[in-house]
Image: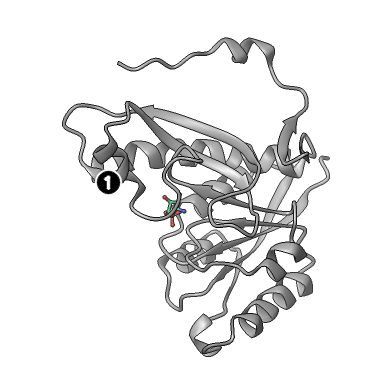
């Protein structure tokens, strides 16, 4: 049987990406196992979803640590270590993490962002993509560095921007691609196929035929 890495998913909201990771990890041959879901927001809908899958959940409310980011992050870090967590996947986790925390989990923490980085870092990515008139938009999974929405890129998925798109229709198309690329990225990282070298991610065992795939729109 495949050796499975222990993963915690950090969320703040509905947790659809979390659910896509949990679903992928239901396959015993998947190299990662989601053993813990932590929310910084009490009552985040994703917590209930995780519990339905039978995954242990915890809430560490940042508001319990007013003006003390360090204490909040120490509590987070302790919880992760208590559970023997090896990799952390951020999935709609809406807190900026300090360089201290990022260093603790360097090359062992990944994030999904709803844009083709380095374009559209930050919030409201779909509105901004429409404003700029880009023809291709998408999502990125990357290792987390101390800068927001920065760090070595593991995988990207692109979708066309269609005439008449609204932020909502575009978000829906991007979300579908997020649910495909996040499980794939975690698989690459947990199996050791994706490794950081000189601030870039090298993936071993890539299918050379895929390198010919070109997405042109319109
Ligand atoms: C996703 O669009 C993700 O890319 C971004 O926040 C959103 C979270 O959605 N970081 P969900 O909670 O995974 O459904």
Q: Is residue 123 above or below residue 126?
A: below
Question: Is disc 1 placed on a helix, strand or loop?
Answer: helix
- Mark 1 lies on residue: 127
Residue at (41, 61) in percent of width and height:
14
Q: Is residue 198 above or below residue 104?
A: above
Q: Where is residue 42 in the image (x, y as percent from the top left)?
A: 45, 79
Residue 80 appearing in the image: yes
Q: Position of residue 206 (x, y in %)?
A: 71, 21
Few, some or many C-alpha atoms within 10 Å of disc 1 (few <14, some 14-19, many ≥20)? some
Q: On the picture, is 140 further left or further right than 124?
A: right
Residue at (68, 39) in percent of width and height:
187
> Where is residue 44, by image quadrant?
bottom left
Q: On the picture, is 53 further left or further right than 108?
A: left
Figure quadrant of the C terminus = top left
Q: On the picture, is 52 further left or further right than 85?
A: left
> Where is residue 38, by image quadrant?
bottom right
Q: What number of labels is visible?
A: 1
Residue at (54, 57) in percent of width and height:
148
Q: Is residue 212 above or below residue 66?
A: above
Residue 30 appearing in the image: no
Seen from the viewer's position, the closer of residues 134 and 50 is: 134
Q: Where is residue 96 in the image (x, y as percent from the top left)?
A: 54, 67
Mark 1 vs ligand 1: CB below 8 Å: no
Q: Position of residue 173 (x, y in %)?
A: 34, 36
Q: How is this picture coloured?
A: one colour
Figure quadrant of the N terminus = top right
């Amino acid at each position: 049987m495949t050796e499975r890495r222990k993963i915690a998913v950090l969320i703040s909201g509905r947790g659809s990406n979390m659910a896509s990771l949990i679903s992928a990890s239901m396959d015993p041959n998947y190299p990662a196992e989601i053993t813990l879901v932590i929310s910084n927001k009490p009552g985040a809908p994703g917590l209930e979803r995780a519990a339905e899958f039978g995954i242990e959940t915890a809430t560490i409310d940042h508001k319990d640590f007013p003006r003390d980011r360090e204490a909040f992050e120490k509590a987070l870090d302790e919880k992760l270590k208590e559970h023997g967590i090896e990799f952390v996947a951020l999935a709609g986790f809406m807190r900026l993490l300090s360089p201290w925390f990022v260093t603790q989990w360097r090359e062992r923490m990944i994030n999904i962002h709803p844009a083709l980085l380095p374009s559209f870092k930050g919030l409201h990515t779909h509105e901004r993509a429409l404003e700029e008139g880009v023809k291709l938009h998408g999502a990125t999974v990357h290792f987390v560095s101390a800068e927001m929405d920065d760090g070595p890129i593991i995988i990207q998925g692109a979708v066309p921007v269609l005439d008449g798109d609204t932020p909502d229709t575009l978000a829906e198309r991007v979300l579908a691609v997020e649910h495909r690329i996040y499980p794939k990225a975690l698989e690459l990282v947990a199996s050791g196929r994706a490794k950081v070298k000189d601030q870039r991610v090298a993936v071993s065992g890539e299918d050379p035929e895929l390198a010919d795939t070109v997405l042109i729109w319109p």
